[in-house]
Amino acid sequence: MSYFVNEKGYYGDFGGAYIPEMLYPNVEELRQQYLSIIHEESFQQEFKALLKDYVGRPSPLYLAKRLSGKYGANIFLKREDLNHTGAHKINNTIGQILLAERLGKKRIIAETGAGQHGVATATVCALRGLECVVYMGEVDIKRQAPNVARMKMLGAKVVPATSGSKTLKDATNEAMRDWINNPVDTHYIIGSVVGPHPYPDMVSIFQSIISEETKKQLLEQTGKDQPDYVMACVGGGSNAAGMFYHFIDDESVKLIAVEAGGKGVDSGLSAATTYLGKEGVLHGSRSILMQTPDGQVVEPHSVSAGLDYPGIGPQHAHLFKTGRGKYVSITDDESLNAGLLLTQLEGIIPAIESAHALAYLEYMKFKGGENVVVCLSGRGDKDMETYMKHFNL
Amino acid sequence: MNRLQQLFQNKKKDILSIYYTAGYPNLNDTLQIAEALEKAGADFLEIGFPYSDPVADGPIIQASSKQSLDQGMTLQILFSQLKDLRKTVTIPILLMGYVNPVLQFGVENFCKACAEIGIDGCIIPDLPMYEYEELYHSCFEEHGVSNIFLVTPQTSEERIRKIDGLSNAFIYLLSSAATTGKNLDVSANARTYFARIKAMDLKNPLMIGFGISDKQTFDAANEYASGAIIGSAFVKCLANGDVEKNVKTFMKEFRN
């Protein structure tokens, strides 16, 4: 069985390009060219050089000794939090901006929830001198003021999405509408492994640097390049897609994806998509999404803005449905506690998104000595207010 | 031959189609608006079934969709509102909406319900041609439901030919690549594009939509197509006051 995209743009039953005709020429142009552009030697050289000298890659693979002691396994943290701009998001925006340049695009649009992808997009636009417009839900603009200021300082125009719930899903709708209205000169940098084909595949290729490095680093540190488990949090699923990429076809490596359970999966305030969702179409691809019986998209909830999304990427839907990946969820409180625990055991303050993946360690049953890689997708600076409130700091 | 195909056989010019959102302004206005529009001279109608995330729509239709959903509209309710449609409405009716509610309702069930009520076709902007061809075409054909495809200024000639082959009622020509509710720019560019498509001599008639809001834009569209479709401008006029009066006032400009 293949866990990667086929020539029609599908992962098993999921994927495709469910887009209005107005978007077809843009998406089709991308579909025809993304692989050949990405595989050009000049592209690879430029991409790798920027990842090394600008982003600061390779990111360390750190054996967290005290955390390992607590759980009885060798727990390695893939330190995406140490990237420039503080998360894995920049791997994708670097790749897409180089691609946009080669497609001759002059204007960049993006959606953002917590603002991490917006900042990563505004950053590469500043780096390359391209116009940048970021759509962000009105509610998120209020919740994430420091990131809004960062984007503005980087020269991006931040446009509030005022429709629907005024959060990530609506920001994505607005970005798609912008693209419909600007069909020639604009490239849309989607921040996750969602959207119409080829976005999920393209974004996972740019994020696959995470598992590519992990394999090498594991070989150096443990003598073999395969761990027993890899774990990552999933909103749309881009850090998980990158963390899983080079391990997907090796079935001896267990893949664990951690969704946001919010206040509890049955509380009505959750973003545990595989548990609560059904198959359907959202933002251009067939996947699993939270919806009413009538097919209206349901508003998700998570303490972590980066996981506050009612769907997952089509590859994740496929990994879930085939059983290749194990999809679980962690509540708001559990994730915050795991964030505090990592901080106090290892001196690393994680993003609340990444803390979801760490929190699931509590539920793992280790025999002892297993090698576990957890993707630490981002740093917690942006979440200090939430941590402060929760722990009365 | 369904009503839609008959209409295009009998009328070659000046066809006026009106779009409105089901369940708006009030949940149970759907049928009454259809009746009033037929009386006022509309040639056929597109009834929108609302969706929570209408990416191809501008602010007016977004707002009407949201209001309709807030009032409890579902596809199930829409079909029950239209159950006796054919007792009072004779003009062709299309349903227009996004693919996810159709998937959840079940494509087969959806086509069956359309056929039973006397719905002649549908427009599902985010159902791609490839998926339609592979999975839905036979079901639509079997139930006599025409699927309408959109064409934009950026659609290639090869693709337009393919769309022409898969269509059996009309082709929906977008005045520009844009979300709904923008004003038609009857510029030289738009005219060149309309003329280019007209010159392709397609087997299906053309209807121009998006940006048609008044007599002037309607007449401009008529120079190149069998008629035009008005959506946002009509939905906007329904916002306040009596539905029947609003329909009459709006239609006066087009039909004396």
Image: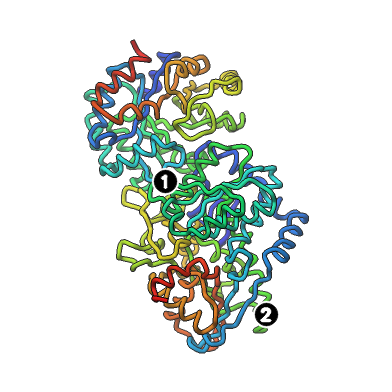
Residue A8 visible in the snapshot: no
Residue B94 figure quarter: top left
The quadrant holding residue A347 is bottom right
Circle 2 crowding by C-alpha within 10 Å: few under 14, some 14–19, many from 20: few
Tell me the chain of label 1.
A
Q: Earlier in the sequence, mark 1 or mark 2?
A: 1
Q: Secondary structure at mark 1?
A: loop
Give the amino acid type for the residue marked by disc 1 in the picture. Thr
| Disc 2: which residue | A219
From the image, tell me which residue sits under label 1: A162
Q: CA distance from mark 1 to mark 2?
A: 49 Å
In this rendering, is residue B4 above or below B112? Answer: above
Which residue is pictured at 41% across the width and 62% down the height?
A274
Q: Which residue type does callout 2 highlight?
A: Leu
Residue at horizontal 61 percent and vertical 77 percent from the top: A226
| Residue A244 percent coordinates (x, y) | 57, 68
Camera-nearest label, 1 or 2: 1
**Image-quadrant location for residue B157:** top right
Q: Residue at x 47, y 70 (%)?
A: A384
Q: Chain of mark 2?
A: A
Q: Is residue B147 above or below residue B196?
A: below
